[in-house]
Image (cartoon, helix red, strand yellow):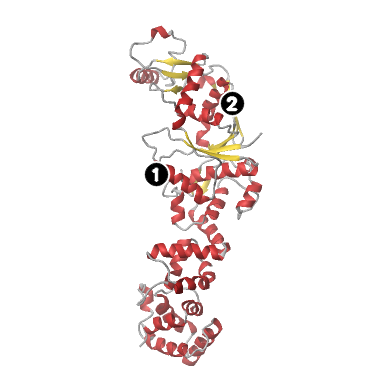
Amino acid sequence: MSVITRFAPSPTGFLHIGGARTALFNWLFAKHHGGEMLLRIEDTDRARSTEAAVTAIHEGLHWLGLDWQGEPISQFARAGRHAEVARQLLADGKAYHCYCSPEELAEMRELAKAEGRSTRYDGRWRERDPSDAPQGVDPVIRLKAPQAGATVVQDLVQGDVTVQNSEMDDMVLLRADSTPTYMLAVVVDDHDMNVSHVIRGDDHLTNAIRQRQIYDLMDWAAPEFAHIPLIHGADGAKLSKRHGALGVEAYRDMGILPAALRNYLLRLGWSHGDEEIIDTEQAIAWFDLDGVGKSPARFDVPRLESLNSHYIREMDEAELCALLAAQLTQEHGRALSDVEAARLPLALAALKERAKTVVELADKAGFLLDGRPLALEEKAAKLLLGEAPAILARAHATLSALDDWDLDALSEALRGLAEAEGLKLGKLAQPLRAALTGRNASPGIFEVLFFLGRQESLDRIGDHMA
């Protein structure tokens, strides 16, 4: 059997983190089995669906590195096909017209509630003669669901899920205005798209029971179902924005790398032994549904940032340099000069060691682009008071006399000056760091001088010496 999965988001907002993980699991499962992942936009909610959201979903998937086969399918565009199936069920005696008005349904529920009975639809039009139909009422089409026995979904993650048919009502397939319901549309689309495996959140588990009934009554083979546990916050509560339930584009803007986010999402609810760092090639080789757990995964932003820092350190330096240059260009609102761009490769190794995100990396690299006179952070300004200007003047004279401007020469010169002055190296390095970067924290002082180059370093020191 060819493996065909599908990712089917609703375009009512951004591609949120839970949806991104569902897409990743579908993509990995298809890749692992040599199959395909399809993309279906479930845009039947016309009031809330927007083209901007569709674009955000496409862009989010592309940024995350998840591709799909063929053109994306619009569920709304297939409404005619959905209605055709509903009417086929009606013609086969497996569905029926229901003429209940909204007021009648509300009254039915209120009475049942008052009598302590189930508020499910009571099937009052199931066997009723259509000649009893009231004038001027457009009916809905309801599924004539089985009333005896049980419906079973053999879920690849949750195991067998059984619901007694007596606990379910005859769901609406086609509304009075001839628009299909979600339950019908999903089944018809998955069947027509030859979807072999439906991998989605376990909040859809009850839907699978109802959808299985449609498959059975249509004599269609149902796909394999795999309902993965939802993502919770680090505190165990339902994931919300305060936990990090943001759109994928927000993580991009935070400076998270796609490879890091893929790795992190992979480990939310799936495991392979004790492996934590799993690149995409290895993930494709290992991923299968038997590694998915039943318990909710917990989303932890610090853990994501820690993983991201690993990917920053391991990233190809040319690629990372280009990413850093783009981030700096965006933040500074101008293109980097040739001199500034040349500083980035020199500084990258030192800057990336403690950076958790690309945004943080750009912040650490900001001093390489800052114009003179530097804006001083409060702590840096304090380091330039008192005897600091005089110390900087002597450092300027020492550095000006250097023939070579490399790390060894800079180290030897400043260590020699500190010894001659009777100063600890830190006492010399602190005002130098403040003058050179405008900050009280930076890479090592020799590296900073080397990155900036002779003239820029001497000019910045000169701005603050006595």
Instruction: Choose top left, top right, bottom left or bottom right for residue 369.
Output: bottom left
Identify residue for label 2.
152
Please give the name of the residue rendered at 45% of the width and 69% of the height, measured from the top-left corner: 365
Q: Quadrant of residue 109?
A: top left
Q: Report the amino acid beneath label 2.
A: Val
Residue 119 in view, yes or no: yes
Q: Can you say which quadrant of the picture contains the N terminus?
A: top right
Residue 55 image point, x, y percent: 43, 45
- The three-letter amino acid code for the residue at tag 1 is Ala
Q: In the rendered view, tell whether residue 292 sits above or below residue 357.
A: above
Residue 249 x/y as whole percent:
44, 51
Q: Residue at x 36, y 75 (%)?
A: 374
Pick whichever, 325 or 290, lies toward us: 325
Q: Residues within 10 Å of mark 1 (few under 14, many from 20)?
A: few
| Residue 34 relative to residue 248: left or right | right
Q: Is residue 143 left or right of residue 102?
A: right
* Residue behind mark 1: 52
User: Mark 2 to mark 1: distance in Å?
Assistant: 39 Å
Closer to us: 335 or 89: 335
Q: Secondary structure at mark 2?
A: strand
The one nearer the camera, 308 or 318, is: 318
Q: Is residue 80 above or below residue 462?
A: above
Mark 2 near mark 1, Cβ–Cβ under 8 Å? Answer: no
**Where's residue 146, x and y in %?**
54, 17
